[in-house]
Amino acid sequence: MYNIFDFNMEDLRNWMKNNGESQFRASQIMDWLYKNGQWNFDCMTNIPKSLVKKLKTNFYIEIPELVKSYQSKLKDTTKFLYKYRDGNIIETVVMKYKHGNSICVSTQVGCRMGCKFCASTVGGMVRNLSSGEILAQVLRSQSEIDERISNVVLMGSGEPLDNYDNVLKFLKMISCDYSLNIGQRHITLSTCGIVPKIRQLAGENLQITLAISLHSPDDINRIKIMPIANKYSIKEIIDSCRYYIDKTGRRISFEYALVRGVNDSLKCAEGLTRLLRGLLCHVNLIPVNEVKENDFKKSSLDNIKGFYNKLVENKIEVTIRREMGSDINAACGQLRRSYLESKRYRKGVENGGDLVRCGQSKKTK
Ligand code: SAH
């Protein structure tokens, strides 16, 4: 049995051909799945009964089950916990902006990169998500909010470039007009810096934005918070970014989570300037989300401002990312972990579909 969402148009046309069916059936089925949101073969009224029968014995339509959702007080951020048919749980976040709805999807169940400040990686990686499983996060979330999603960021749990083939298939598929037709310029892929894969991605002829989770301008400091830095130096990352820019003409985003006493000094800001000067790029400063899985603390407001001002003064393009959903633990992997740890989960009691307003949150500031 195949998950139908793992099939692109070419795959489905080939399947039709190999099974003695007309190839145009593929586009009829795509219309049902993506344009009409019809996720039941029996309701695809223009498909002959005999083909419906064949489809049902060869394919399943996997829309993940909604286990829980949380909405921030400002109602601009909603976090969904979804469960796949094998029981694995992942999280997806939808953010409402003036310019449209943006979704943050997970690419793996868990993560094996081991970044010290990140909750996704506690417990390691369970498995990769298939392209269809990633896509279905968007489909299910669109139907939950009953609005179109126009921007996608691959910044949920998992390292996208550690699941390269499935992620690439997802990127190509979601931007097709028979599917969700989300322009590649509205898609951002974030990586901790797997250099050979960045170079490979540069050759795929995509128009997506690449974001690099840098978090430190020097290797010695970076190794302390990101184990991947043992494998690839910052110089190798920057070289691969240059290659990416040359190949695609796209500006790179550098993610920089400001952690108190770790990477938030003016010296670090100067180091970052030297590293990025002359590169077609943009820096996103993110006050680190404090998670209970570790002891990292957010930089003080003074340090955040100081760091920002130093980059502005040095003519590096920079923004401070607005913190959305910190009252619902919207940082990477946090919710899945707390859910997995909760008594309710251990008892196996599930509470599908209810929207929990988030009063139970504690921190921020
Ligand atoms: N593995 C990919 C994408 C997932 S993480 C990557 O490393 O880029 C998405 C972003 O959230 C990364 O920039 C990551 O470093 C950052 N992140 C993870 N935990 C965080 C936290 N507690 N506070 C702020 N940013 C965090």
Image (cartoon, rainbow, N blue to C red):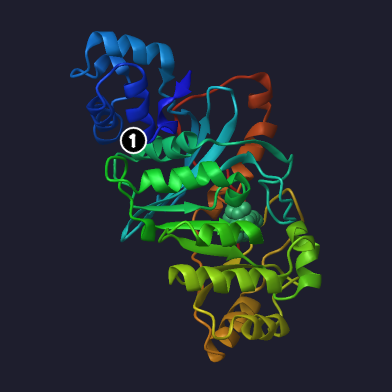
Residue at horizontal 55 percent and vertical 91 percent from the top: 313
Q: Count the marks: how many?
A: 1
Depth check, front residue: 32 or 196: 196
Q: Is residue 248 at all visible to an observer of this figure?
A: yes
Depth check, front residue: 229 or 326: 229
Residue 118 drawn above or below residue 70: below
Residue hosting label 1: 9
Q: Is residue 363 at all visible to an observer of this figure?
A: no
* Quadrant holding the C terminus: bottom right
Residue at horizontal 70 percent and vertical 74 percent from the top: 235
Depth check, front residue: 150 or 162: 162
> What is the x, y in percent for residue 352?
48, 25
Q: Amino acid at mark 1?
A: Met
> What is the x, y in percent for residue 4?
40, 26
Residue at horizontal 43 percent and vertical 20 percent from the top: 60
48 horizontally vs 360: left or right: left
Crowding at mark 1 (Cα within 10 Å: few <14, some 14-19, many 20+): some
Judged from the image, the secondary structure of the residue bearing numbered disc 1 is: helix
Q: Quadrant of residue 50?
A: top left
Residue at horizontal 32 percent and vertical 43 percent from the top: 180
Q: Quarter for ligand 1?
A: bottom right
150 horizontally vs 316: left or right: left
Furthest toward the bottom, the residue is 313
> What is the x, y in percent for residue 346?
69, 23
> What is the x, y in percent for residue 51?
28, 13
